[in-house]
Amino acid sequence: MKSLCLSLFSVAILFLSACSDLERSGPPNIVFIMADDLGYEGLSCNGSLSYSTPNLDKLAIDGMRFTHCYSQPVCTPTRVQIMTGRYNFRNYKQFGFLDLKEKTFGHYLHEAGYTNCIAGKWQLGNGIEAPFLEGFDEYCLWQIYNNVAGEDMRGSRYADPKLYRNGEVINNTAGKFGPDLCTEFVLDFMEANQSEPFFVYYPMILTHDPFIPTPDTEDWDIDPFAKDTSYFRNMLEYTDKLVATIRNKIEELGLTNDTYLFFTGDNGTSRAIYTHTDIGIVRGGKSLTHEYGIHVPFIAYSPGEIAAGSVSSTLVDFTDILPTFCDIAGIEIPKKRVLDGSSILPVLNGESSSGREYIYGYYWTRGRDPLNVKEYVRTADYKYYRSGELFDPVRDPEELNPILTDDKGELLDLLEGYLNEVRPVKK
């Protein structure tokens, strides 16, 4: 009888295991976290001596750390580019706005059967229904109203925040911290949707100014518009803590082997921040097109798919994110759809160690004045602007000393060719 009971128990375990496997037979989950105003130098695994980011460091140790990932210099241009896989000259209309005619990674994944959520910072206009229209099933967001049309409904993003969840303002936020509420929303979403493929896009509220204390400091609820840059350390370390909270939840749900987890920043660190690093003091370069304005951290983690401890020098820009997600999900992008990026899944999975030959940037800020556009390409060794300036971004990251080009004709032809490959210009 005892033997029979053990046999039945073993069969039951196998049956439950098989059912579990059937429940997770679809494509992997994708969790994409993007900190606000956090450049490459902010992470200790990238050389920071000013801040401690043990959880992000561990994510890099357990996954793949990229040393050459590039964003746009400020918030909205990055968000438009990363969500559509297209450069800004194609689709950036105005600061704080995403054209509803664009197809986002939310649309592609939703059409493929994913349940999607977005939490954190919106800043893309079009009203409280916009996240639904952009392919997301649920949201918890700050700056959801159409500020382009003059509605300044933002309120605080940190202490006593004004957040909107699925079309309605969240009440009773007094004494609460906006990033905590957004993170809790993500945790609840993953738990509620654990049996089917899900996509989490978390453009975080942290570490954007105002620089304030966090709930891990005694004075965290002081004036929310304080500007003491010393609090940046607390904000970055709290970011690190929240990323760990999300990773721990994935593990708790037993979804580690079914999930790709990514972390990056949307642009360079605030120019008010100076960081001690292993290469010296780095001043944040947000809103500038030099290295400290567009060079951002990028970490990818997926056990069994991404080799632990990997470091890649592959050039990556934010148009590569959408095609990578589609590749992970097994989505074939129609050839008639013009995308500028390409999937880095072969690099993540160790099938390739190389990627694109250059990254491209086309940037203007809050206006659309052609005279203020900065257009450039960056290879592993050079940065070249359409205006004709050539720089060495490794030795001269702040672009203080243009390279004399008298004997660089062949190189300039190559770099000009790259520019015209992306956006041909008639002479």
Image (cartoon, rainbow, N blue to C red):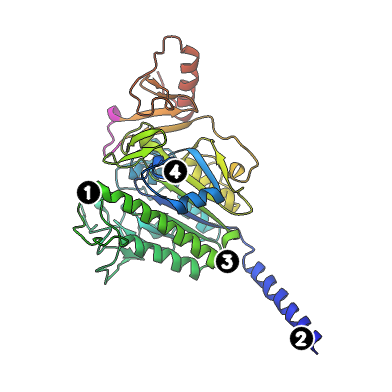
**Mainly helix, strand or loop, the magenta region?**
loop
**Three-letter code for the amino acid on which mark 2 is drawn:** Cys
Q: CA distance from mark 4 to mark 2?
A: 54 Å
Residue type, numbered disc 4: Pro
Label 1 sits on a secondary structure element that is loop
Pointer 4 and pointer 3: residues touching (CB < 8 Å)?
Answer: no
Q: Is residue 33 left or right of residue 231?
A: right
| Residue type of the residue flagged with mark 3 | Gly
Q: Magenta span covers which residues?
A: 365-372
Tell me the quarter of the picture where residue 273 sits. Answer: top left
Q: Which label was assigned to residue 297?
A: 4
Q: Earlier in the sequence, mark 2 or mark 1?
A: 2
Residue nearest the viewer, comparing 253 with 377 = 253
Which callout, 4 or 3, points at the residue further toward the start of the chain? Answer: 3
User: Compared with residue 244, is residue 61 higher up or lower down, i.e. above or below?
Assistant: above
Q: CA distance from mark 1 to mark 3?
A: 41 Å
The residue at which mark 3 appears reads as: 254
- Inter-mark Cα distance, 2 to 1: 67 Å
Mark 4 or 1: in front is: 1
In the picture, which quadrant includes the C terminus? top left
Mark carried by residue 228: 1
Mark sitting earlier along the chain (1/3)? 1
Residue 185 picture quarter? bottom left
